[in-house]
Amino acid sequence: MNIQVTNDAASWYKSEMSLKDGDNLRFFVRYGGFSTFQRGFSLGIEKEEPSEIGASTTVDGIMFYIEEKDLWYFSGHDLLVSYNAKMDETEFEYLTEQTF
């Protein structure tokens, strides 16, 4: 499982969440919300120190990661996080593993 975060998405998170170089942003599975990927679950985000990293990437000084216990959600897929300028928000895409 791989994570790719575009530079525009990383900049958006830094601005919206007042992140600075060296901070960590965790993507975690939460019950409820809206997802076209896993019915009944969605991804949440929080600034947090890592515990058991299952996948990670560092972009623009920020480590984006998913803990080992949440890898089940991705079910053989990679995560691409991009920025939608029209909506002024980030978007998640679930790609077949090793797409990027």
Image (cartoon, grey):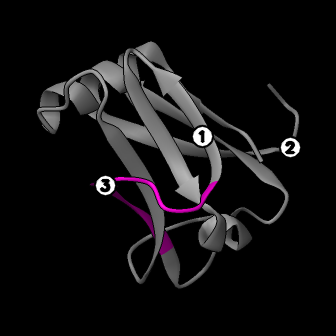
- Callout 2: helix, strand or loop? loop
Q: Decide: few, some or many residues near mark 3? Use Cα within 10 Å; few <14, some 14-19, many ≥20.
A: few
> Percent x, y for residue 71?
69, 65
Instruction: Determine whether 56 is above or below 59 in the image.
Output: below
Q: Which mark is residue 56?
A: 1
Of marks 2 and 3, the one in the foreground: 3
Q: Please give left or right for residue 13 compared with residue 78 in the image.
A: left
- Asked which quadrant contains residue 83, the reply is top left
**Residue at the disc numbered 2:** 97
Q: Which mark is residue 38?
A: none
Q: Please give left or right for residue 91 compared with residue 66 in the image.
A: left
Instruction: Determine whether 61 is above or below 96 in the image.
Output: above
Name which residue lies at 62% across and 73% down. Answer: 69
**Residue at the disc numbered 3:** 48
Of marks 2 and 1, the one in the foreground: 1
Could you tell me how far apart the alpha carbons at marks 2 and 1 are, in whole angstroms?
A: 14 Å
Q: Decide: few, some or many residues near mark 1? Use Cα within 10 Å; few <14, some 14-19, many ≥20.
A: many
> Percent x, y for residue 17?
15, 39
Could you tell me how far apart the alpha carbons at marks 3 and 1 are, in whole angstroms?
A: 13 Å
Q: Please give left or right for residue 90 compared with residue 40 in the image.
A: left
Name which residue lies at 85% across and 31% down. Answer: 99
- Callout 1: helix, strand or loop? strand
